[in-house]
Image: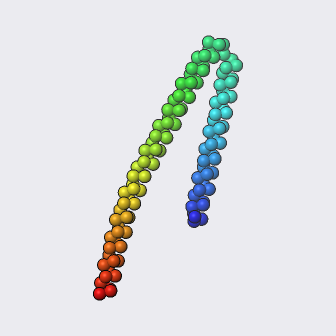
Amino acid sequence: MSHAAYLALDAGSRVGQGLALGHMAVETFKGEIRRERRAAASSVAELAIRLQEAREDEDAALHRAAVAEQAAAQARRAAANLVVENHAMAQEIMALRAELAAARRGYAA
């Protein structure tokens, strides 16, 4: 593996770590806000708050699912492009082998 590949992997892992830490910070902050809301609310109000939080969580989950679906579609397109590229390369290799065999036959004659 080249040095550039190692650097890319390292940078990618650092970005992933940063995103994970950011996500944890947001979740911790949301948890603190929720605890403060619940401490100041009656039981009926608490149920309304929990319902609102559940709706917010659902919206966030739907957004993450949409982003993941887009990434999956992009990965499928990339894989299809690789299959096409691989097929083209295989055909090119077969043509080069045929040329080489013809050249060898012409050279041997």
Q: Is residue 29 left or right of residue 64?
A: right
Across and down, in percent, residue 43 comes to 65, 13
Q: Relative to the observer, which residue lies in front, 18 or 79?
A: 79
What residue sits 68% from the left and 28% below the top?
32
Across and down, in percent, residue 34 comes to 65, 25
Q: Relative to the observer, which residue lies in front, 1 or 15?
A: 1
What residue sits 37% from the left and 69% below the top?
93
Q: What scheme was used to colour the molecule?
A: rainbow
Total number of numbered discs in the rendering = 0
What residue sits 69% from the left and 23% below the top?
36
Across and down, in percent, residue 35 comes to 68, 24
Kindly indicate the quadrant of the structure image that contains residue 103.
Answer: bottom left
Q: Is residue 62 left or right of residue 17?
A: left
What residue sits 37% from the left and 57% below the top?
84
- Where is the C terminus found, in terms of image quarters? bottom left
Across and down, in percent, residue 98 comes to 32, 73
- Where is the N terminus found, in terms of image quarters? bottom right
Q: Relative to the observer, which residue lies in front, 30 or 13?
A: 13
